[in-house]
């Protein structure tokens, strides 16, 4: 399925920044992130991995986005297609193809490149929260311009307990150390969500009330979620624009971390 924005220049193949969006679950569509990426000029090919085959090659894409889902990262017996997603993410990192992996996507990226994922010892991390950037972000083209403690939406029971070899830690939280990381030259994993909408989160809360009850008091009211998503858009829409800019540049050579992009 292609999400096509005529204003993006997509009718000119030479100008199109085509991104593959891997959607593991119907419950976690690209949401607001799709609007931000299209608004920055990207063309999105969305593949629901539980129902559709992944592309045989990444040759036609300038970048990859992998979203979240309710399944566990190594639950291959019930979801055998997870192995194909891990393989695709490993290939993207090997190609130095700009990659943005969110929640389950980040866990799949971590495992695909040598990291370890496990259930959180203190229970789920849920609701509107803050994460803290690490000093090591330096002049990273995606993270450098974020606030030091950006708003995020958490909804996960597993954590990345060990980062992949050579990965760089980009953000942490008190409950979960490895919130965001960079593997290779441009493989970004984020355990938190930025793509959600109020309706999406209300559906998650209704489907997993035992997890949702771990949110801060009043965290899953419609009013509270509307305000949270307004705050998310202020911070993360420019981040999505920077990701499209990164993809426009093409695969990044190893050792290119820290090269600054022009301001949006």
Image (spheres, grey):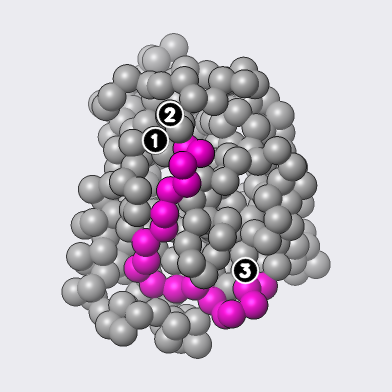
In the rendered structure, the answer to whether residue 144 lies left or right of residue 207 reads: left
Q: Quadrant of residue 262?
A: top left
CA distance for labels 3 and 2: 29 Å
Q: Is residue 52 magenta?
A: no
Mark pair 3, 1: CA separation: 27 Å
Which numbered circle lies on residue 158?
Answer: 3
Q: Is residue 157 left or right of residue 211?
A: right
- What is the span of residues highlighted in magenta in the rendered image? 119-137
Which class describes the residues within 10 Å of circle 2: few (<14), some (14-19), or many (20+)? some
Q: How many marks?
A: 3
Of residues 107 and 70, the one nearer the viewer is: 107
Circle 2 is placed at which residue position?
A: 139
**Residue named by callout 1:** 144
The one nearer the camera, 154 or 68, is 154
Identify the mark nearer the N-term, 1 or 2: 2
Give the CA separation, mark 1 to mark 2.
5 Å
Left or right of 89 on screen, residue 153: left
Instruction: In this rendered view, identify the residue nearer to me: 14 or 98.
Output: 98
Mark 1: secondary structure: loop
Residue positioned 64% across, 59% down in the render:
160
Closer mark to the observer between disc 3 and disc 1 = 1
Residue in the image at 33% along x and 58% along y = 151
Counting residues from the start of the chain, the first of labels 3 and 1 encountered is 1
**Disc 3: CA contacts within 10 A as few (<14), some (14-19) or many (>=20):** many
- Is there a contact, CB below 8 Å, between mark 1 and mark 2? yes
């Amino acid at each position: 399925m292609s999400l096509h924005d005529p204003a993006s220049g997509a009718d000119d193949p030479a100008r199109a920044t085509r991104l593959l969006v891997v959607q593991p679950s119907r419950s976690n569509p690209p949401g607001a992130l799709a609007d931000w990426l299209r608004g920055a000029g990207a063309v999105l090919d969305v593949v629901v991995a539980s129902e559709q085959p992944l592309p045989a090659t990444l040759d036609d894409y300038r970048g990859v986005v992998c979203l979240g889902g309710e399944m566990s990262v190594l639950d291959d017996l019930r979801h055998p297609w997870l192995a194909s997603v891990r393989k695709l993410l490993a290939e993207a990192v090997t190609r130095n193809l700009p990659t943005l992996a969110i929640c389950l996507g980040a866990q799949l990226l971590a495992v695909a490149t040598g990291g370890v994922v496990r259930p959180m010892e203190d229970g789920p991390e849920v609701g509107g929260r803050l994460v803290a950037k690490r000093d090591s972000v330096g002049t990273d083209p995606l993270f450098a311009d974020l606030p030091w403690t950006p708003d995020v939406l958490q909804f996960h029971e597993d954590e990345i307990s060990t980062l992949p070899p050579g990965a760089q830690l980009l953000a942490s939280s008190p409950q979960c150390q490895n919130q965001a990381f960079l593997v290779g030259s441009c493989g970004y994993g984020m355990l938190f969500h930025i793509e959600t909408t109020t309706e999406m989160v209300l559906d998650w809360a209704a489907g997993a009330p035992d997890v949702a009850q771990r949110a801060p008091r009043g965290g899953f009211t419609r009013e509270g979620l509307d305000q949270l998503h307004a705050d998310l858009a202020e911070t993360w829409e420019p981040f999505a624009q920077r990701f499209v800019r990164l993809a426009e540049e093409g695969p990044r050579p190893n050792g290119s971390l820290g090269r600054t992009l022009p301001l949006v």
